[in-house]
């Protein structure tokens, strides 16, 4: 005799329990996924900041390690009686640091002492420091030189005059160039020509890009200002005598904007290492780059000559601080007395320069800092 047995399925309670367990597991997995994404984003942000700092330090150190004066003279050798005959180094701090301890928010001054960090070291936020110097590359091969592009399309006649002028740095196209320079002379129809030399002026400064709360508002007053570190380079001629005697009209400055020169009285004045040693350079008075309150002012007349040729070194910078170690018994880096050090008028030399860079990551809202010390 056959017995009918009913086939039993899941009850409603069992289904609800299974669904609840499934939802619970899905929530745990989704939360783990979100946390992993946040962790990855944070690690990537930190990695990007560190990589950017390393790249900027390589560029800065490369310039600082080069010669800045004639011969084997060092910045530590500068005295009131022994001034370099070629080259220069200028460090400008737009203002003295303000003590921000107990202040909330920090005062708007561009150079602020924030107090001691977790390691007991003083922490600063600086946005109005400027490093300006002559750089002389070692070696006498073209690949070792600093190269400038000349806009021959804008002023072909002026560029042709520049290359044909007989002097110690530029001769007729059929003559050999001396070891201290290298050039590709202008040929009719070319859009650009190139001129290279061992010597150049180099300037580092900050341009505001926004703030920590308004990243794209360059005039933001909310949060901490954020900047980009810029580097401008102006290639120098080894000897300016003959090319200045050629009296190239000053209206042709756009063709030579990558060279160390200015429109002076209607003609272009080109500067040599000997000229910059006595203050004749693209920015004769570096303090002219600052506005009210010691704030760097990219809209100033001096910056109008600098900014068109500047290139980005480091984005998202909240602090670019330059301190010095003067010659003498001191072993502590300090701020610049009087806010300006200029080797053309200084009565003391520098044993070393310390540069501290701090960068900001908008996604993780974190900062990282790097300190670079270079023997001078």
Image (cartoon, rainbow, N blue to C red):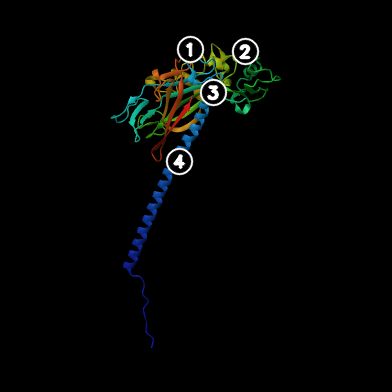
Label 1: few (<14), some (14–19) or many (≥20) C-alpha neighbours in 10 Å: few
Is the C-beta separation of discs 1 and 4 under 8 Å?
no
Q: Helix or strand or loop: what does disc 1 sit on?
A: loop
- Going from the N terminus, do you reach mark 1 or mark 3 first? 3
**Residue lying farthest bottom?**
1
| Residue 105 position within the rendered picture, expressed as x and y whole percent measured from the top left | 31, 30
Residue linked to disc 4 = 47
Residue 105 left/right relative to 339: left
Horizontal and vertical percent position of residue 225:
38, 30
Disc nearest the viewer among 1 and 3 = 1
Horizontally, is 286 left or right of 71 in the view?
left
How packed mark 2 is, by other alpha carbons closer than 10 Å (few <14, some 14-19, many 20 or more), is some
- Name the residue tied to disc 1: 81
Foreground pick, 88 / 271: 88
Of labels 2 and 1, earlier in sequence is 1
Quadrant into which the N terminus falls = bottom left
Where in the figure is residue 160, as x and y percent of width and height?
Answer: 65, 18
- What residue did someone put label 3 on? 67
Mark closer to the observer (3, 2): 3
Residue lying farthest to the right in this orientation? 174
């Amino acid at each position: 005799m056959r017995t009918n047995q009913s086939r039993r399925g899941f009850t409603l309670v069992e289904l609800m329990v299974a669904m609840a367990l499934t939802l619970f597991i899905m929530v745990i997995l989704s939360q783990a996924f979100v946390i992993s994404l946040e962790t990855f984003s944070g690690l990537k942000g930190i990695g990007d900041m560190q990589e950017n700092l390393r790249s900027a330090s390589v560029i800065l150190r490369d310039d600082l390690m080069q010669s800045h004066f004639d011969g084997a003279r060092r910045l530590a050798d500068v005295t009131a009686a022994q001034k370099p005959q070629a080259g220069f180094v200028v460090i400008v701090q737009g203002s003295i640091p303000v003590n921000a301890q107990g202040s909330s928010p920090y005062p708007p001054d561009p150079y602020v002492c924030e107090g001691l960090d977790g390691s007991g070291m003083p922490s600063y936020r600086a946005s109005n420091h400027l490093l300006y110097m002559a750089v002389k590359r070692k070696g006498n091969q073209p690949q070792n030189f600093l190269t400038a592009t000349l806009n021959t399309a804008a002023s072909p006649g002026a560029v042709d005059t520049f290359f044909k002028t007989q002097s110690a740095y530029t001769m007729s196209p059929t003559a050999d160039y001396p070891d201290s320079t290298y050039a590709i002379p202008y040929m009719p129809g070319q859009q650009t020509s190139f001129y290279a030399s061992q010597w150049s002026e180099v300037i580092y400064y900050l341009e505001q890009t926004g703030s920590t709360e308004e990243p794209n508002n360059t005039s933001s007053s909310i949060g901490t200002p954020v900047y980009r570190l810029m580097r401008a380079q102006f290639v120098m001629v080894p000897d300016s005598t003959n090319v200045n005697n050629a009296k190239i009209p000053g209206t042709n400055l756009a063709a030579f904007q990558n060279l160390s020169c200015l429109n002076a009285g209607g003609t272009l004045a080109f500067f040599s290492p000997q000229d910059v040693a006595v203050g004749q350079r693209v920015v004769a008075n570096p303090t002219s780059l600052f506005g009210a309150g010691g704030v760097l002012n990219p809209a100033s007349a001096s910056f109008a000559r600098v900014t068109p040729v500047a290139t980005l070194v480091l984005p998202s910078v909240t602090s670019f601080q330059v301190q010095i170690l003067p010659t003498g018994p001191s072993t502590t880096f300090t701020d610049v007395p009087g806010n300006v050090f200029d080797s053309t008028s200084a009565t003391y030399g520098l044993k070393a320069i310390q540069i501290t860079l701090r960068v900001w990551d908008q996604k993780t809202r974190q900062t990282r800092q790097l300190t670079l010390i270079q023997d001078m």
